[in-house]
């Protein structure tokens, strides 16, 4: 049996993950990353529940202070992104730079573990023909979190277990109840940890970005209204513009240089293609020729047909052009584009961050 460090958030998913592995005979150690500074952070309740769980199971438990790492790689990343007129996706960034990378290093080097495990809904398989570890969608497509995990590298995938990948959420709660876990009926987190901590992304950003009033304009430059800062807007947004118009208007662009929010009707928010940088090829080696795939451009959106075209990049950071089979609404710079082989296999081929339109 293996020594496995389980990342515990204090929720039902990570609790069941620890219990499944413990009951299977593995040596399990619970570990929580303390992420946010200040009083009342969401981590506090989670650490209390995680500690209680480990005590009930009779396993060791540790807390690792990751607040400085979280501030550097997530808080600064989010604030800088919004200030530059993009809408960052902190979860995938957090998984690769705060959770899996540092946690795996600590688990192996400091705790002598063989693997780490988390309560994510995703699957990892090993392709003996290619030698690559492959990331796949969870069986429960409604809970699938592979979109947020596309940036994990081969070493991280090789040393990670996702016990809930073959389990549905109702089954997870049933297991928790059958095992008598005190987290069995604990409500799920409903939003980003930053949002839950501060109430809204707007409130969070107000701590770091001062109001910077400017104009809301249409595509011709005609002033239609005013805004208090472009960081309060995102591509495709319709609500909260404060503009009276014959037809609904949407945010179609954010001009940082002119400090303008650009709006237009719905058809002006669709895109037939986008470029993606910071690409990570997950389940396959980087291709040199275009490939057909199904692309997901936000967490809750449906994957759509597209062609992925590799772009020669002198900087070596990895870029592709995504050409959609049909134009897509609200392609948002800063969000992830993740491409899958198809719905049946659920195999994640790669992903990256959508670039602003030049």
Image (spheres, grey):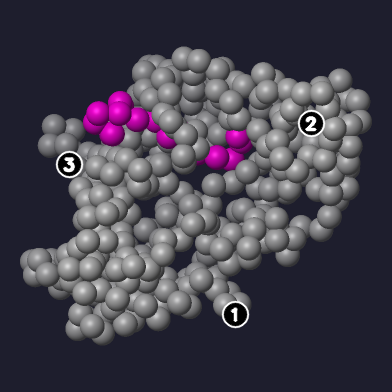
Residue 255, position in %: x, y? 78, 35
Please indicate whether residue 185 sits to the left or right of residue 37 in the image. left
| Secondary-structure class at tag 1 | loop
The residue positioned 45% from the left and 77% from the top of the image is 45
Can see residue 206? Answer: yes
Q: Are marks 1 and 3 in contact (CB under 8 Å)?
A: no
Measured Cα–Cα span from mark 1 to mark 2: 38 Å
Query: Is residue 232 inside the magenta stretch?
Result: no
Q: Which comes sooner in the sequence, label 1 or label 2? A: 1
| Secondary-structure class at tag 2 | strand
Please indicate whether residue 169 sits to the left or right of residue 41 in the image. left
Mark 1 highlights which residue? 39
The residue positioned 36% from the left and 18% from the top of the image is 292
| Secondary-structure class at tag 3 | strand
Disc 1 versus disc 3: nearer the observer: 1
Give 288 or 84, whichever is nearer the viewer: 84
Q: Which mark is residue 126?
A: 3
Height in image: 217 above or below 5? above
Farthest residue in the right direction? 223
Query: Is residue 334 inside the magenta stretch?
Result: yes
Q: Which residues are magenta?
A: 332-347
Q: Which mark is residue 262?
A: 2
Q: Which comes sooner in the sequence, label 3 or label 2? A: 3
Measured Cα–Cα span from mark 3 to mark 2: 47 Å
Give 112 or 126, whichever is nearer the viewer: 126
The N terminus - image quarter: bottom left
């Amino acid at each position: 049996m293996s020594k496995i460090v389980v990342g515990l958030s204090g929720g039902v998913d990570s609790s069941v993950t620890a219990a499944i592995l413990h009951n299977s005979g593995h040596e399990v150690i619970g570990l929580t990353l303390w992420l946010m500074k200040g009083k009342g952070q969401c981590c506090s309740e989670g650490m209390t529940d995680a500690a209680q769980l480990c005590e009930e199971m009779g396993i060791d438990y540790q807390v690792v202070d990751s607040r400085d790492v979280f501030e550097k790689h997530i808080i600064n990343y989010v604030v800088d992104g919004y200030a530059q007129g993009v809408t960052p996706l902190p979860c995938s960034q957090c998984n690769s730079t705060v959770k899996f990378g540092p946690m795996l290093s600590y688990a192996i080097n400091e705790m002598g573990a063989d693997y780490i495990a988390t309560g994510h809904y995703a699957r990892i398989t090993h392709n003996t023909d290619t030698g690559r570890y492959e990331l796949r969608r969870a069986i429960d497509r409604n809970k699938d979190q592979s979109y947020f995990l596309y940036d994990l590298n081969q070493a991280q995938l090789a040393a990670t277990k996702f016990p809930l990948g073959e389990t549905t959420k109702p089954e997870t709660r049933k297991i928790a109840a059958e095992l008598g876990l005190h987290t069995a009926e604990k409500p799920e987190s409903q939003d980003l940890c930053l949002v839950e901590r501060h109430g809204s992304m707007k409130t969070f950003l107000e701590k770091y970005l001062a109001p910077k009033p400017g104009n809301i304009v249409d595509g011709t430059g005609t002033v239609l209204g005013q805004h208090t800062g472009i960081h309060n807007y995102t591509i495709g947004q319709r609500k909260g513009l404060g503009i009276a118009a014959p037809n609904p208007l949407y945010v179609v662009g954010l001009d940082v240089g002119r400090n303008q929010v650009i709006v237009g009707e719905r058809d002006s928010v669709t895109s037939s293609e986008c470029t993606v940088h910071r690409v990570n090829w997950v389940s396959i080696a980087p291709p040199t020729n275009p490939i057909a795939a199904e692309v997901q451009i936000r967490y809750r959106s449906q994957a759509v047909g597209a062609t992925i075209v590799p772009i020669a990049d002198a900087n070596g950071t990895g870029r592709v052009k995504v050409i959609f089979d049909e134009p897509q609404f609200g392609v948002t710079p800063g969000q992830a584009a993740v491409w899958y082989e198809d719905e049946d296999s659920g195999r994640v081929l790669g992903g990256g961050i959508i670039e602003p339109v030049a």
